[in-house]
Every structure is written in structure tokens, then in C-alpha cells.
């Protein structure tokens, strides 16, 4: 507009050559200086669990650059772990990835057992696998629902919450808590499976595949959902590797890596299941891979339930555990990817250093590479398809 | 993969190192200034997956641990370098972009720096926070338990 209004003083302006009724030459807005816009998205949760702040640089509707601003849920879990005894650790580790607490607990238990050379009864390993697979389904349900909402599909969310509720009821009966389980301890699990847990579990198994099929019809069969997900947020295999991505995000790019197969832990060496892979690496592939993972988890749970061994649920472990000085790394395949616990002991009653290798932390690292060049409208779907949990990213 | 094999790979790239096979796995210790060269050599040798970088306060200095893996062969290698308090190690993001967040985190929580990092800002904490993963910074919480270490 600067070019339109004259800066000459009153009275010295040239006679305006304007048609009657017009105040100025309609020159449009071409003379506006166009600049890139920095947009703050959040801090809130776009299809994520937790609080994420995204800074995006926009040119019109196109994303030029993006940066994830994290730390809103930082509680210093790694520092707190240095002042907790080994059997107290479940309490704080549950609060890292609070959507699938069993995986963090188990990774820590595996690391401690490696360090202190503790034998784990076969039954304890099977119970761990059982609760982890149930937790994986609950976690994928709570991803599938919100990501549908991001793409405009409201209905599946409530159906998925219904199934998740069935699992959480089972997990509550087993551990005493719906999300903050504190159930897996070094040496085994806190208590045996409760009597009568078979019935509610089999009730879920009976409907799981059928109900999930209905959700697939509602989501994957929906033309709008497909249009929003297909070809959006494509991650090439080399990009996934460069950013250390793992889990369903890595597998949907076509890289066949699943710790349950690569380095079997707990009962996975004795269980038959497939690892679903994607081909394109877009958001729709990640959706398909996770849905298929739920089907596979149902298969695993059925086998675990049928073959659950008899015996002790834990071995005898000292209350004040003092593992010898040393350093170990143990990892599990969490719903988000490789969740590792790197444990350093100096022989004391608390860990000297505990490092939580968070899969979502590395999966989120791809944000700039993923979002740049895309549209702002696709940003939420792209980010949501990564399945990040900020509690685990911020620790 | 035995640590000696890793050390041979590094030696071929002109990086001297001390290998040892520990409970952790293949551990290779080297000079902090050579870590970028070492990781570039490992990447070229098929260690395509970067797992983690974290620091530990040993009481005398900061020990940085780089964890990489050859995905196809399922070989894990831990590279360890020691930097003094407020010291530095070169950024390795040109070999492994995955390290970008982890270097920022290690920098703010342990008070070290990574020259060459393209965006060396704080990541998790706000300006003025102590580098609290150092042992000299106390846990300030009601639940703090100080257990005697013999």
C-alpha cells in the first residue's frame, strides 16, 4: 500500500487521474512485501500423547522448515533414577512412556537381571510377554483413534476406546493399576496372574479381530481417510535409518527390523508371529502396519494364554539389590520402537547412571525432514502418524 | 563383532583406539577429538543405525557413549570418549543426523559442547538450569533418598 498513498505534502499532489467514485488506483496487493511466516503450533497435543510445540516456517501453505520444541514434560527421570533403589524404579519408569508402561518396566528389569545375573522363571517371562502384547494393543488403539480424528474421522475413536477399556480392565486385574502398573520387577513379576483372568481375556480375544476389522472398514475403507493419509509424510528407508527411527515407523519404510525377532527376549523366541512391513513409507503404510501389528499381537496373546507354563512368577531377589559394578544395555520392542535401558552400576544400592533410549525421541528427530516441503494441512497427519509419546521423549 | 575388529576398522581410517569386550558388548575407547572420524569410518563399514548418545559424570570428567549398530549383521558397538567438564567433542551429525537432539541434550544436561552442531540450542530445559546430570548437582525433591555407599 506504500506505493499508493502519496507521501507528498497536502496541496502539492498532482491532479489525480482517477475515474469518478474511486479514491485510488486499484493496484492490488502486489506491492506488499511477502515474507515467510513463523507459526507456533502448540504447545498442545496434535494427535500425540503429551505436550509438543512445533515451530514451522511457512511460505503460504507450504512448510519451509519445522522444528520440534520439546521438554514440556521433562521431569528428570534419568536423574531421579540415580536416587532410587532398583525395586523402586518401576514407579518413575512407568511415567516415561505412560501409554505402554510394561515395556519400560521390562527393559529395566532385563537390564538389571543381566547386570546382577538373576535367573527369571519361565512363567515370569511368559507373563511379561503377555502383558506387553496387551499393552501394545492398548497403545495402538489409542494411536489409531486419535489419528483418525486428525484426519476427520470422529467415530472410530470411541469404538477403539471400548476395546482399549477391555484390555485396561484386564491389566488392572493383573497389576492393580490401569496405566502406572509397577508390576514387572527384576527377577520376575510382582504377583501371579489372578484366578479367573482367562475369561475376560478370552472375551477380548473373541472380538478383537472382528471389531478391528470394523474399524478398518471405517478408517482404511474410507475414501477421505485414504486421501488424507496416502502419499503424505513419506519417509524413505535411508531417511528412517539416518534419523535412528525404529518400530512401526522403520518397518513401514520397508526395513525389516523387530527386536522380538532379531534378539528374542522373554517368551518371543517360542512364539509364532509375523512382522508386517510397509512399502511406500507414507502415513497410510504406518496405519496399515500398526493395524496388522494388533492382529499379530492377538495371535501372540492367544498362544501365550494357551501355553502359559506352571511355576513361580518370580525368583528370589534381595530387597536391597546391589548389582556388581558394570554396564549393560537391554532393549525391548515397544509400540514405538526400540526402547533401551543403558544401566551403569558402581556396586551401590541405586544405579550410578540410567539412560533411557527412547524410540519416540529419535522418531521425532525426523520432523524437519518429514514436514519441510509439505503442506501445513498435512502436518498434523504426518506428525500424528509417527505415534510419539512426549512423556517418553522428555523423560 | 569383537571389539578388536572394530579397532581394526578405525585403525584403517587412521584413528587409534583401545578395544575391550565387556558385559556391555564391544566397547572401543578413543580420543574425543577423533570421534567424528571414527563414526564416519563405522558408517562406511555398514554401521547404519545410530541408537544413542549419552553422557555420564564419572566424578572426574564426562564420559560420552555413542551406540551404533550394523542392522543387517546385528552388531552393536559402543564408542566411548572422555571429555573434561565444560569440554567439547566434535558434532557427528554429518554421519548420523539422528544425533542432533541427543547432542543438544547432552550439552545442556552435562555442560559439554559439540562444535559443528547446526542448531546448538537447549533442548529440554530452560535457560539457567544447572547441568543436573552432573553428580555435583543434587536432586532437589522431597523423595530424595541418600543411601549409604560403602
Image: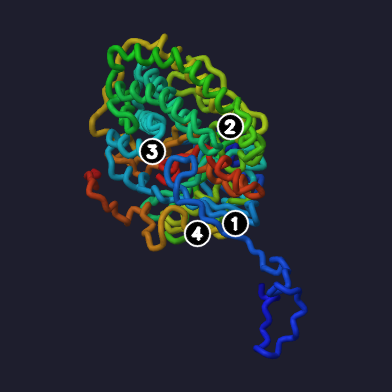
Distance from the alpha carbon under mark 1 to that under mark 4: 18 Å
Q: Are marks 3 and 4 on the same chain?
A: no
Q: Which residue is mark 3?
A: A326
Residue mark closest to the camera, 2 vs 4: 2
> Residue A286 shows which numbered tag?
2
Distance from the alpha carbon under mark 1 to that under mark 3: 46 Å
Tag 3 secondary structure: strand
Residue occupying image coordinates x 59% and y 60%: A37
Q: Which residue is mark 4?
A: B121
Residue occupying image coordinates x 44% and y 40%: A49
Distance from the alpha carbon under mark 2 to that under mark 1: 26 Å
Distance from the alpha carbon under mark 3 to that under mark 4: 33 Å
| Label 4: chain letter | B
Q: Kindly tell me whether residue B82 is visible in this rendering.
A: no
Residue occupying image coordinates x 50% and y 49%: B102
| Label 1: chain letter | A
x and y percentages locating residue A370 in the rendered image: 61, 45
Q: Which residue is mark 1?
A: A57
Q: Are marks 1 and 3 on the same chain?
A: yes
| Label 3: chain letter | A
Residue mark closest to the camera, 1 vs 3: 1
Residue mark closest to the camera, 1 vs 4: 1
Q: Quadrant of the C terminus of chain A?
A: top left
Amino acid at each position: 500500500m506504500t506505493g499508493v498513498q502519496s507521501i507528498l505534502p497536502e496541496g502539492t499532489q498532482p491532479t489525480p487521474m482517477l475515474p469518478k467514485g474511486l479514491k485510488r488506483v486499484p493496484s492490488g496487493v502486489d506491492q506488499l512485501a511477502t515474507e515467510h511466516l513463523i507459526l507456533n503450533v502448540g504447545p498442545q497435543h496434535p494427535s500425540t500423547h503429551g505436550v509438543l510445540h512445533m515451530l514451522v516456517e511457512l511460505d503460504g501453505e507450504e512448510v519451509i522448515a519445522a522444528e520440534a520444541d520439546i521438554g514440556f514434560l521433562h521431569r528428570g527421570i534419568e536423574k531421579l533414577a540415580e536416587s532410587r533403589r532398583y525395586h523402586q524404579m518401576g514407579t518413575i519408569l512407568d511415567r516415561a512412556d505412560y501409554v505402554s508402561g510394561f515395556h519400560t518396566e521390562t527393559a529395566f528389569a532385563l537390564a538389571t537381571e543381566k547386570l546382577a545375573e538373576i535367573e527369571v522363571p519361565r512363567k515370569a517371562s511368559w507373563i511379561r510377554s503377555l502383558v506387553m502384547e496387551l499393552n501394545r494393543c492398548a497403545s495402538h488403539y489409542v494411536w489409531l483413534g486419535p489419528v483418525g480424528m486428525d484426519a476427520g474421522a470422529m467415530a472410530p475413536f470411541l469404538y477403539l476406546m471400548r476395546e482399549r477399556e477391555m484390555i485396561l480392565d484386564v491389566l488392572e486385574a493383573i497389576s492393580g493399576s490401569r496405566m502406572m502398573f509397577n508390576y514387572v520387577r527384576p527377577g520376575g513379576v510382582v504377583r501371579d496372574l489372578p484366578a479367573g483372568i482367562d475369561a475376560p481375556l478370552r472375551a477380548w480375544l473373541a472380538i478383537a479381530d472382528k471389531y478391528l476389522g470394523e474399524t478398518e472398514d471405517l478408517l482404511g475403507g474410507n475414501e477421505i481417510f485414504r486421501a488424507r493419509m496416502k502419499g503424505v509424510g513419506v519417509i524413505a528407508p535411508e531417511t528412517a535409518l539416518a534419523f535412528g527411527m525404529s518400530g512401526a515407523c522403520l518397518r513401514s519404510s520397508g526395513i525389516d527390523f523387530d527386536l522380538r525377532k532379531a534378539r528374542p527376549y522373554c517368551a518371543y523366541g517360542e512364539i509364532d508371529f509375523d512382522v508386517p512391513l510397509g512399502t511406500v513409507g507414507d502415513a497410510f503404510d504406518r496405519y496399515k502396519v500398526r493395524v496388522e501389528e494388533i492382529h499379530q499381537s492377538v495371535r501372540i496373546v492367544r498362544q501365550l494364554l494357551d501355553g502359559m507354563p506352571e511355576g513361580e512368577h518370580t525368583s528370589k531377589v534381595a530387597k536391597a539389590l546391589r548389582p556388581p559394578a558394570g554396564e549393560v544395555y537391554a532393549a525391548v520392542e515397544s509400540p514405538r520402537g526400540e526402547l533401551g535401558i543403558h544401566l551403569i552400576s558402581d556396586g551401590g544400592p541405586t544405579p550410578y547412571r540410567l539412560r533411557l533410549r527412547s524410540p519416540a525421541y529419535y522418531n521425532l528427530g525426523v520432523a524437519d525432514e518429514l514436514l519441510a516441503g509439505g503442506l501445513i494441512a498435512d502436518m498434523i497427519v504426518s506428525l500424528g502418524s509417527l505415534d510419539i509419546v512426549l512423556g517418553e521423549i522428555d523423560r | 563383532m569383537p571389539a578388536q575388529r572394530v579397532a581394526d576398522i578405525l585403525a584403517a581410517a587412521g584413528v587409534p583406539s583401545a578395544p575391550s569386550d565387556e558385559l556391555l558388548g564391544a566397547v572401543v575407547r578413543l580420543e574425543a577429538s577423533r570421534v567424528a572420524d571414527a563414526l564416519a569410518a563405522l558408517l562406511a563399514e555398514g554401521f547404519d543405525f545410530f541408537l544413542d548418545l549419552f553422557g555420564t559424570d564419572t566424578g572426574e570428567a564426562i564420559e560420552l557413549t555413542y551406540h551404533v549398530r550394523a542392522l543387517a549383521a546385528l552388531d552393536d558397538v559402543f564408542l566411548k570418549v572422555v571429555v573434561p567438564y565444560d569440554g567439547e567433542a566434535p558434532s557427528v551429525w554429518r554421519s548420523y543426523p539422528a544425533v542432533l537432539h541427543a547432542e543438544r541434550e547432552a550439552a545442556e544436561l552435562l555442560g559439554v559442547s559439540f562444535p559443528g552442531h547446526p542448531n546448538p540450542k537447549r533442548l529440554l530445559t530452560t535457560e539457567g538450569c544447572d547441568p543436573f546430570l552432573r553428580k555435583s548437582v543434587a536432586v532437589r525433591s522431597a523423595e530424595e533418598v541418600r543411601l549409604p555407599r560403602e
